Image: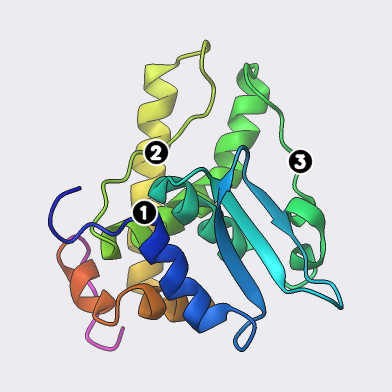
Amino acid sequence: MGTGEMAAGEIAARFNRAFGRAGAGTVLLGGAEEPLYLPATARRPAIIRYTLDYAASALHELAHWLVAGAERRRQVDYGYWYAPPPRDAEAQRRFYQVEVGVQSLELLLATVCGLAFRPSADNPGRDDPQGAAEFASAVEARACERVQRGLSARPAAVLQALEPHWRLRLCDRFEVPAHG
């Protein structure tokens, strides 16, 4: 990792300090073979599991948590559908529709953590360079739109927990309004 890049463990530690048992009752844990969200129970907080010790996986799963509303956060894996690859063109189009919002938040999270972001088409064996390029542009545009519009409270709070100077970090990549 280069200077200023956050490791997965640091991301989890910062998130858990702010949103663990005393906060939103959600903890972020690595080491999973596959990502998984488990809603809170009477005996334990909600758990966001990310793959192994990959910072990109931690940020992607945090982005899913940010997109999910209160009802979805009461369901295993937020109640989302997932069509595993390889996906046909229609299924891939639906994947992009859902993921553009998620990955735009992931891009903002990665930016404040000093990490590179690579949009994921998650469809190996069905490479579509033009579709992937259009998706990457849509993710960037949605991230810029979010910043210009002003972030809602939950994404802003997560960015604050990860990096207290997040607005300045975003200014390096996005035009952040003075009030943002």
Q: Which mark is residue 119?
A: 2
Where does residue 171 sit, x and y in percent of width and height? 18, 70
Placement of 9 over or under 69, stated as above or below: above
Image point 14% across, 65% down: which residue?
Answer: 172
Q: Which residues are magenta?
A: 173-180
130 left or right, relative to 94: left
Q: Which residue bears the numbered disc 3?
A: 81
State the image quarter where residue 108 is shown. Answer: bottom left
Q: Which residue bears the numbered disc 1?
A: 107
- Name the residue furthest right: 42
State the image quarter where residue 146 is shown. Answer: bottom left
Where does residue 87 sit, x and y in percent of width and height? 64, 19
Placement of 78 over or under 138, stated as above or below: below
Badge 2 amino acid: Pro
Element class at badge 3: loop
User: Circles 1 and 2: CB distance less than 8 Å?
Assistant: yes
Placement of 31 over or under 83, stated as above or below: below
User: Circles 1 and 3: CB distance less than 8 Å?
Assistant: no
Where does residue 66 sit, x and y in percent of width and height? 57, 66
Badge 3 amino acid: Trp
Q: Main secondary structure of the magenta part?
A: loop
Element class at badge 2: loop
Badge 1 amino acid: Leu
76 left or right, relative to 85: right
